[in-house]
Image (cartoon, rainbow, N blue to C red):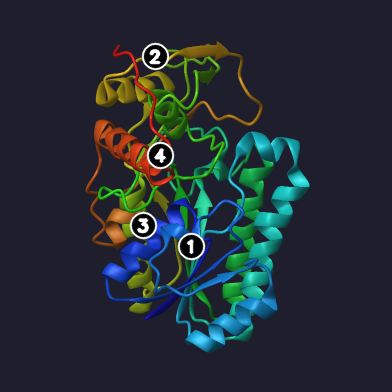
Amino acid sequence: MTVLVTGGAGYIGSHMVLALREAGDDVVVIDNLSTGFSSLLPEDVPLFIGDAGDENLVEGVIAAHDVDAIIHFAGSVVVPDSMRDPLGYYRNNTMTTRNLLSAAVRCRVPRFVFSSTAAVYGNPDRVPVAEDAPTRPLSPYGMSKLMSEIMLHDTAAAHGLEYVVLRYFNVAGADPQARTGLATTGATHLLKVAVEVATGQRAKIDIHGTDYPTPDGTCIRDFIHVSDLVQAHRAALAHLAVGRGSATWNCGYGRGYSVREVIDAVRRVSGRSIAVQESGRRPGDIMTMVADTSRIRAATNWTPAYDDLDVIAAHALAWEEHWLSRRGVPAPAMATA
């Protein structure tokens, strides 16, 4: 199988490329390198620097490499940014997906795996949240992904394309061998910020909202290790390859951790102090989001390997220290907690 990975030089995409290669699949990547790094890819993986919404580029890549499936990661993912720049998110996420689907249909690519988000649910009525829960996004980010899901469903019905939508919960951690990880400058992922504080790159971490009706007053999220997430994508490809039809699956572990619990995990694994600053709630933030994962577990043989918050934090920290050393930046000595 030859798989086109859009956004393949980014955080999740680069992990996906490694997993596909290890499984013996051929891989080709399209990435505009706005948040990705070509250095995270194996040297022999073809990389086309450009936009996944450039239909001429996509069609040329598909034809040249005889692509059998597309995994679409490319897009913008920061909820607060989407509140400030909704049109940018509808362009980068929804319009890019539309153009990519158009190219896939013209080239008769039979299988498509789409990177969606639990943000499509908004504040759910029940937790854990199942795939048939109402979709009520609170942010343009969530809405841009839901629009893309709808387009994918309608395109598949009209053209015979089969797809799997994977609704990610909170992706975290890094490759256990530190071959790749989250390298984006100024990333807003909670665990990434915490390990940047632990390695002296930031002075503090902000907690946005401490008055939620949760056990410690902070938001609760279902954190999934990025390596387990990419194995869910491999399970999706296998599902489509044997003709089991289109599907929508949550990707999480089915348990939640608060913001404070995540920060405490980084303190434990690093043995370092982490300064915290508390502030008010942010528009678009969801209070509690935990996945019901029964559907993906019933449909596939997907079995998480890293369902442990301290393991996720340790892998994120190891990657951060490795990434600093690769760039020749020594991590400042830190006072232990």
**Real-space Cα distance between discs 4 and 2?**
35 Å
Q: Nearer the viewer, residue 96 or 238?
A: 96
Q: Residue 14: image x %, image y %?
A: 42, 58
Point out the tag, 3 or 1, that comes first from the N-terminus: 1
Q: Which residue is mark 4?
A: 324
Q: Nearer the viewer, residue 1 or 8?
A: 8
Q: Residue 206: image x %, image y %?
A: 53, 19
Q: For residue 301, what is the image quadrant?
A: bottom left
Q: Is residue 160 above or below residue 126?
A: below
Q: In the rendered image, is residue 235 in sight?
A: no
Q: Which residue is mark 1?
A: 8
Q: Which mark is residue 195?
A: none
Mark 1, residues whose alpha carbon is within 10 Å: few (<14), some, or many (≥20)?
many
Quarter of the picture holding the N terminus? bottom left
**Real-space Cα distance between discs 3 and 2?**
31 Å
Q: In the rendered image, is residue 283 in sight?
A: yes
Mark 2, residues whose alpha carbon is within 10 Å: few (<14), some, or many (≥20)?
few
From the image, state whether disc 1 or disc 2 is nearer to you: 1
Q: Which residue is mark 3?
A: 230
Q: Which residue is mark 2?
A: 215
Mark 3, residues whose alpha carbon is within 10 Å: few (<14), some, or many (≥20)?
many
Is residue 217 shown left or right of residue 79?
A: left
**Real-space Cα distance between discs 3 and 1?**
12 Å
